[in-house]
Amino acid sequence: MSAANTVRLPTQPELRVLKPSRTPVSKLLGKTEHLLIVVPEKPPVSIWRQLPDGTKLRKIAGKSLAANTLIRSRLANAAGTGITLGKLPGTGSGKKAVSAFERLSFSGRLAADVCGDNPASVAVLVAGFDAVTEAAILESLLLALAAHRFNMPVYKSEPTSRKRLNSVRILKDETGIDVPRILAEANATNLVRWLTSQPPNFLDAKMYLALLRSLAKDKGWKLSFLSEAKLKKAGAGAFLAVSQGNAMRDAGIVHIRYRPKKSAVRPKIALVGKGIIFDTGGNNLKPFKGMLDMHQDMAGSAVAVATLAALTDLEAPFAVDCWLAITENRVSANAYKPRDIVTASNGVSIEVIHTDAEGRMALADTLALAAREQPTAIVDFATLTGSCIAALTERYSGALTNRPTLNELLIDTGRRCGERIWPFPMDHDFDEELRSEVADVMQCAPAGGGDHIQAARFLNRFIPDHTAWVHIDLSSASRKGGLAQVPGEVTGFGARYAINLVLDSHEQLAAAAKG
Ligand SMILES: [Zn+2]
């Protein structure tokens, strides 16, 4: 056994956000390294008069006709403050509203330009919009700057250049944006990116548990660990079928509890995450390219725990439990095989078909154990199926629920926050493909086809009828070139979605459980 490689939680201090002040703008800018300006696509002439160096900027803007060209300049002050100006496409008279996704993508381009200069301080000025649009743009810019300034894990022997940005000064804010909420969302996205990008020989099951314990200490959570021995006692044969192929006996299910300070007990929400810390595919081995990034197969667990961290920071007024299924899926003499039959903790017997469908095996017991604690609603996150990517690409993630009345809310939450979700059908007749001659259910359909739907129908066997359940198949966890405001391949997708769904719509989730 080699010495353990250490992973730490991100150490970069949180972005400091300074609200508008009475100090004259010219004085503030004298102490700021970069100024970020957003105006409408076709700004009225009066706008330029409101901007520092407006006459000069208007001249430059007049030359660049394309709406999506960024305008760069420098203030003639002692600090030589750099300027990046962007015209938000699709805004101005008679144009329809810009979507949250478009706004975040635009903000990501601006943040990339700003951080290219690596300033320590940025001032932000949004001019020429109504108050609601101004607030939405400010929010997007903060999310984008927080994503772009984040130093991702690197393991080079020579020190690499670090992002210096530590403070953002907002120059104008009509409505008063909710900065703690925005930062909690941004931090959650970054935590998912941080955890999901760790090398698999660093973030192994043991190190992941150690990290979760230190996070639990920080946040005041109660954490319990269901080891393989405990899971054997609980009869969790589906999870153990996957973990039995590991070289180490350190896999297990982590259960974390958040309880609000004020004793509001209902509704109780359970967040569940797939934490396959490396997925070889098992005996049905993945080919080279399919296996290359399989250290990211724990993204669902990172989304669940990062969401819990944000809900804790924002003092959510309801109880939340978090359940993380943490194991590798390896090839070994002990690894589970096609046609094995195992029994899960709720007594359902499963006929194994494909060892690369390990996520639904690990989740089956995790969902069943989460359900025993009688939550009102369960929301789970998993990089579960290739077929969900085939259906949606990496731009959207999929949603499947045992309460179809929630589908509208699920779409709308994605539209509002810019992390887009699309639902799939959950009709009972899909179960016909999972019918087994020898067990209660087959793990997946040998003929294939609609595997993201089949996976959800399979998981549905482990959810009691009285519990509302939403399953998110994270097809957008990873995307070449990033997604919306987030640069780099690992997108952190899911945490902001979950925060928006659970925090803003916990009452609808509870109502759906009854209905
Ligand atoms: Zn797999």
Image: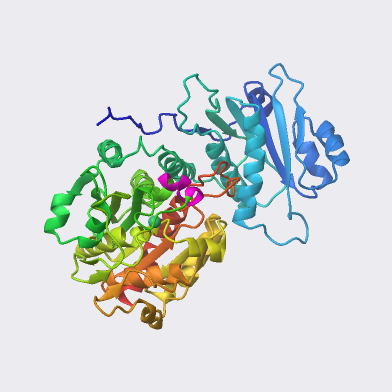
* Residue ID at (24%, 75%): 439
Q: Is residue 227 left or right of residue 33?
A: left
The image shows residue 367 at horizontal and vertical percentages of: 28, 62
The image shows residue 306 at horizontal and vertical percentages of: 38, 46
What secondary structure characterizes most of the magenta part? helix
- Which residue is situated farthest in the front direction here? 333
Q: Is residue 415 left or right of residue 406?
A: right
On screen, residue 373 above or below 105:
below
The image shows residue 472 at horizontal and vertical percentages of: 42, 61
Query: Where's ligand 1: which quadrant?
Result: bottom left
- Residue range highlighted in magenta: 288-295
Q: Is residue 7 left or right of residue 496?
A: left
Asked whether 427 or 448 is in front, the reply is 448
Asked whether 301 or 248 is in front, the reply is 248
On screen, residue 425 above or below 51:
below
Whether residue 463 appears in this view of the structure is: no
